[in-house]
Image (cartoon, rainbow, N blue to C red):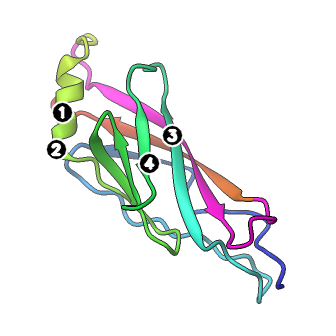
Amino acid sequence: WPRPWNTLHYQVASVAVTVGEEVPILQPIAPSEKGLLKPSDYVAACEAVGHVDKQFVFDSLLGAGLLAGHPILEITKDGTVSISPAASLTQLFDAMPDVGGTRKSLVLDCAIWGIFPDASLAPIHAGLSVELLDNMC
């Protein structure tokens, strides 16, 4: 077997995006050493910081991450991450208390996991912070 990637990195470790908009696509950065085995599958695990009532679920069949049922991100089989929170997410912001005239936001603390086809190889992960901003100020 070829040796696996030993780390997972993306161009950035944090992004901010307004509901209804899209962040430029994030692609995993291949290690400089050639010929290494890359992960065959990717999943995301996220937590809404300070909002334990808002559950994040990653549907590995669809490659989609949802916050309280609202689509937030997608990950393709090659590890490309697309972050585009659905307009329906405004329902969550509307239910949140006003914070003195400032724009409401949620921060997702995420880990993108790369999984190898051989279960004996440990998964690798990259941290990603996603700030979701309400489209109403």
* Element assignment for label 4: strand
- Label 1 sits on residue: 90
Residue 53 in view in this figure: yes
* 93 over 6 or under it: above or below: above
- Label 2 sits on residue: 87
Q: Dot 4 surroundings within 10 Å: few (below 14), some, or many (20 or more)? A: many
Q: Is residue 79 left or right of residue 101?
A: right
Q: How many marks?
A: 4
Nearest to N terminus: mark 4 or mark 2? 4
| Labels 1 & 2 near each other (Cβ < 8 A) | yes
- Quadrant of the frame with the N terminus: bottom right
Report, in whole angstroms, how far the alpha carbon at label 3 lies from the one at label 4.
Answer: 9 Å
Taking the spot 46% from the left edge, 20% from the top edge, the residue there is: 52
* 105 over 2 or under it: above or below: above
Residue 22 lies in the magenta-colored region: no
Residue 37 % position (x, y): 73, 80
Furthest residue in direction bottom, as rendered: 35
Q: In which quarter of the image is residue 132?
A: top left
Nearest to N terminus: mark 3 or mark 2? 3
Taking the spot 33% from the left edge, 28% from the top edge, the residue there is: 105
Residue type at numbered disc 3: Cys
Report, in whole angstroms, how far the alpha carbon at label 1 lies from the one at label 2.
Answer: 6 Å
State the extent of the magenta-drawn residues as a range: 101-122
User: Which of pointers 3 and 4 indicates the residue nearer the eye?
Assistant: 4
- Find residue 135 and name its label: none
Report, in whole angstroms, how far the alpha carbon at label 1 lies from the one at label 3.
Answer: 19 Å
- Find residue 46 and name its label: 3
User: Which of pointers 1 and 3 indicates the residue nearer the eye?
Assistant: 3
Q: Quadrant of residue 60?
A: bottom left
